[in-house]
């Protein structure tokens, strides 16, 4: 049985006029959502009066932070008060003039986690002649998804897992994706099953995610696992990898969470909401802020720990932080950069160059939370295999 299917709401294919100094971001989001974006010339501007050129050159794509749907990003678009000044988007402004010594090195910590997993896999192989298996279903040919799936395959090889991959065309039906998932659900050599997100628009993500066996839901996206995470006295079998990675980064960096005030920016199902629940489980007092929250900088200034998962490039500036706060940046936004090979560079939701002067510890983008997402996926898959084989070390 599958739950009621709620399809992603789509931005209507309407002509939209956007007026703001940051309309590049806004228009790009809508462009991705297949809305027809009409760029207004300055003499047409009626709202902010901040309008720039009428050309559509700026229609470059800015992708949302990982785990965030276009819909979620869309909700932030009207918060003109939260967009960083245009100058911040310029490359020179993002280069820090001193080495940031307070960086939490997500790449190094992910390597450490993978080393530990590889050792456990070695012991499992010696003891029972079995290793964990991870199955990934990829739909369509999004370049970023293909890259992440390749990274998952590579990570499996590094730690000694078996990996199983199915690639389905963009035009596949929901039924065919579910069939692929069900086959892996039944395969005893597979301990983790995931469908790479996002899915094409015609596919109901809720139904596909709900078809993954709860015992193999190493992404932790199944409503049963999410529900258990939200309940006192219940434990999910798996917690989604990005928020789990945030907590692991804090713990492995010696950050005390218990008794601290944490602010989570964003309330998405896959990052903001589970991150807030995990912080509460670590006995932090948690405030969740979102696109409808007034006085956002005032609230973040009260936080000992800030987790930024809004999908708005450079939103969190130095002045938003309490001196000594710990900052975890979940944002993975691609912004245009003519100097780079592919025309884009990856930036977070935090304006690192400023924030690193105020924070006591801070994650960079890239090289912060991102690598931990895959490390936590391996960790969940190992846990699943241990459960399946009843393999527990003393
Ligand atoms: N089924 C899932 N789909 C998606 C998930 C997920 O956890 N499960 N998360 C993201 C994509 N993702 C893994 O799948 C992922 C994203 C980013 C990184 C990463 O290491 N990022 C680098 C920067 C990458 C870049 O240059 O673009 C970093 O932050 O250093 C790893 C995994 C959405 N889909």
Image (cartoon, grey):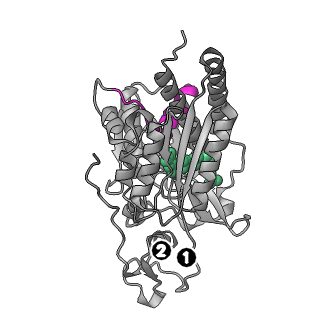
Q: Is residue 253 magenta?
A: yes
Q: Residues within 10 Å of mark 1 (few under 14, many from 20)?
A: many
| Residue that appears at 68% across and 51% down | 96
Q: Residues within 10 Å of mark 2 (few under 14, many from 20)?
A: some
| Residue that appears at 40% across and 26% down | 282
Q: Seen in the image, is 314 located left or right of residue 115?
A: left
Residue 261 vertical placement versus 182 (above, below)? above
| Residue that appears at 47% across and 84% down | 39
- Quadrant of the rendered image containing residue 367: top right
Q: Position of residue 391 (x, y in %)?
A: 52, 17
Q: Position of residue 56 (x, y in %)?
A: 55, 82
Residue 203 vertical placement versus 36 (above, below)? above
Q: Secondary structure at mark 2?
A: helix
Q: Which residue is mark 2?
A: 31
Name the disc covering residue 59, or none. 1
| Residue that appears at 47% across and 49% down | 180
The answer to whether residue 212 of the structure is visible from this angle is yes
Q: Position of residue 362 (x, y in %)?
A: 58, 40
Q: Are marks 1 and 2 in contact (CB under 8 Å)?
A: yes
- Work out whether mark 1 precedes mark 2 in sequence or the reverse, and give the earlier one: 2
Q: Which residues are magenta?
A: 235-255
């Amino acid at each position: 049985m599958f739950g009621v299917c709620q399809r992603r709401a789509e931005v209507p294919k309407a002509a939209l006029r956007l007026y703001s100094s940051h309309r590049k971001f806004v228009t790009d989001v809508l462009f991705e959502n297949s809305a027809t974006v009409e760029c207004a010339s300055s003499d047409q501007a009626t709202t902010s009066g901040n309008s720039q050129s009428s050309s559509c050159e700026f229609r470059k794509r800015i992708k949302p932070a990982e785990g965030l749907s276009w819909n979620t990003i869309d909700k932030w678009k009207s918060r003109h008060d939260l967009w960083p000044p245009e100058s911040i988007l310029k490359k020179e402004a993002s280069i820090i003039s001193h080495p940031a010594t307070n960086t939490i090195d997500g790449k190094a910590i992910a390597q450490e986690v993978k080393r530990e997993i590889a050792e456990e896999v070695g012991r499992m192989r010696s003891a029972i002649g079995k290793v964990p298996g991870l199955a990934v279903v990829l739909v369509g040919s999004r370049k970023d998804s293909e890259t992440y799936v390749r990274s998952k395959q590579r990570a499996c090889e590094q730690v000694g897992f078996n990996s199983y991959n199915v690639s389905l065309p963009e035009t596949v039906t929901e039924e065919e994706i579910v069939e692929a998932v069900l086959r892996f659900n039944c395969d005893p050599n597979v301990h983790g099953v995931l469908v790479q997100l996002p899915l094409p628009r015609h596919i109901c993500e809720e139904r596909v995610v709900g078809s993954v066996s709860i015992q193999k839901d190493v992404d932790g996206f199944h409503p049963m696992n999410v529900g258990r995470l939200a309940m006192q006295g219940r434990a999910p079998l798996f917690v989604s990898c990005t928020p789990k990675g945030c907590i692991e980064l804090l713990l492995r960096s010696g950050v005390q969470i218990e008794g601290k005030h944490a602010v989570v920016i964003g309330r998405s199902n896959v990052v903001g909401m589970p991150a807030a629940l995990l912080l509460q489980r670590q006995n932090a007092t948690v405030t969740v802020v979102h696109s409808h929250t007034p006085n956002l900088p005032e609230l973040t200034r009260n936080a000992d720990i800030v987790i930024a998962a809004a999908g708005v490039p450079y939103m969190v500036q130095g002045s938003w932080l309490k001196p000594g706060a710990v900052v975890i940046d979940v944002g993975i936004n691609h912004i245009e950069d003519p100097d780079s090979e592919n025309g884009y560079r990856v930036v977070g939701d935090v304006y690192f160059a400023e924030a690193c002067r105020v924070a006591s510890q801070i994650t960079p983008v890239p090289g912060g939370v991102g690598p931990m997402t895959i490390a936590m996926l391996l960790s969940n898959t190992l846990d699943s295999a241990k459960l399946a084989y009843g393999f527990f070390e003393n």
